Each structure stands twice: as structure tokens, then as C-alpha cells.
Image: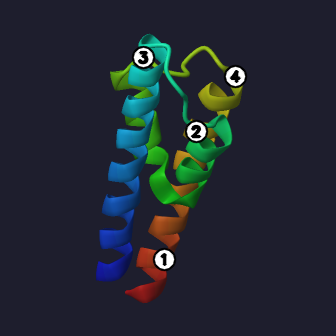
Amino acid sequence: MKLVLIYLLMINGISLIFYGLDKLFAVKDMWRIREFTLLVLAAAGGSAGALLGMLLFRHKIRKAKFFVTVPLLLALHAGMLFWLKSFLV
């Protein structure tokens, strides 16, 4: 369980950083991070970091693809974590 928590902290931190970088690149009209990459990070366990990044940086909050998918992934991940915790105890 400890490794799972370390992984989740890392993937959520990376996800938050990527959302922040993409917002910065958007404002400066620079090369952007692909939406696919941002969603894959969220799906890989970084949904909390993705949602925090969306709200903190006000980024991708108007796109239904993100506004719907990221919270659903977060709910799914929370359920899986709860199930895993109850299964291991």
C-alpha cells in the first residue's frame, strides 16, 4: 500500500505540473502539451492533480472532455483506492 501511495503522490504531482505548464504555454502562445497526454496522466492515477491544476490554473475548465472526464476519473480512482484499502486490511 505504501508503494501505491508513493506512486499516487508522484503521478498527481506530475499531472499538476503538466497542467500548469500547459496553461503557461497557452498564455505565452508557445508549443502546447497534447490534450491526450493530459488525459492519460489523469487516467494513470493523476486525476486529483489534474483537477487541482484545472481549478488552480483555470485551465481546460470549459472543455467538456476535461470538465466531465477528470472528475469521473477521480471518483473512479477514489473508489478503487477505497476498495484496495478494504481488501488489504
Helix, strand or loop for disc 2: helix
Left or right of 12 on screen, residue 72: right
Are the residues tagged 3 and 2 within 8 Å (C-beta)?
Answer: no
Residue 12: x, y in percent?
38, 52
The residue under the point 35% across, 41% down is 17
Question: Label 1 vs label 4: CA separation?
Answer: 30 Å
Residue type, label 3: Arg
Front residue of this view, candidates 7 and 77? 7
Question: Label 1 vs label 2: CA separation?
Answer: 21 Å
Q: Where on the picture, by quarter, is residue 80?
A: bottom right
User: Crowding at label 1, few (<14), some or many (≥20) Cα neighbours within 10 Å?
Assistant: few
The residue under the point 51% across, 72% down is 83
- Depicted 31 relative to depicted 71: above or below: above
Residue type, label 2: Val
Looking at the image, tell me whether mark 1 or mark 2 is earlier in sequence order.
Answer: 2
Q: Residue 64 — which label? A: 4
Looking at the image, tell me whether mark 4 or mark 2 is earlier in sequence order.
Answer: 4
Question: Which of the image's four quarters has the N terminus?
Answer: bottom left
Are the residues tagged 3 and 1 within 8 Å (C-beta)?
Answer: no
Residue type, label 4: Ala
- Depicted 29 relative to depicted 33: above or below: above
Question: Label 4 vs label 2: CA separation?
Answer: 10 Å
Q: Mark 1 points at which residue?
A: 84
Are the residues tagged 4 and 2 within 8 Å (C-beta)?
Answer: no
Helix, strand or loop for disc 3: loop
User: Crowding at label 3, few (<14), some or many (≥20) Cα neighbours within 10 Å?
Assistant: some
Helix, strand or loop for disc 1: helix
Residue type, label 1: Leu
User: Crowding at label 4, few (<14), some or many (≥20) Cα neighbours within 10 Å?
Assistant: few
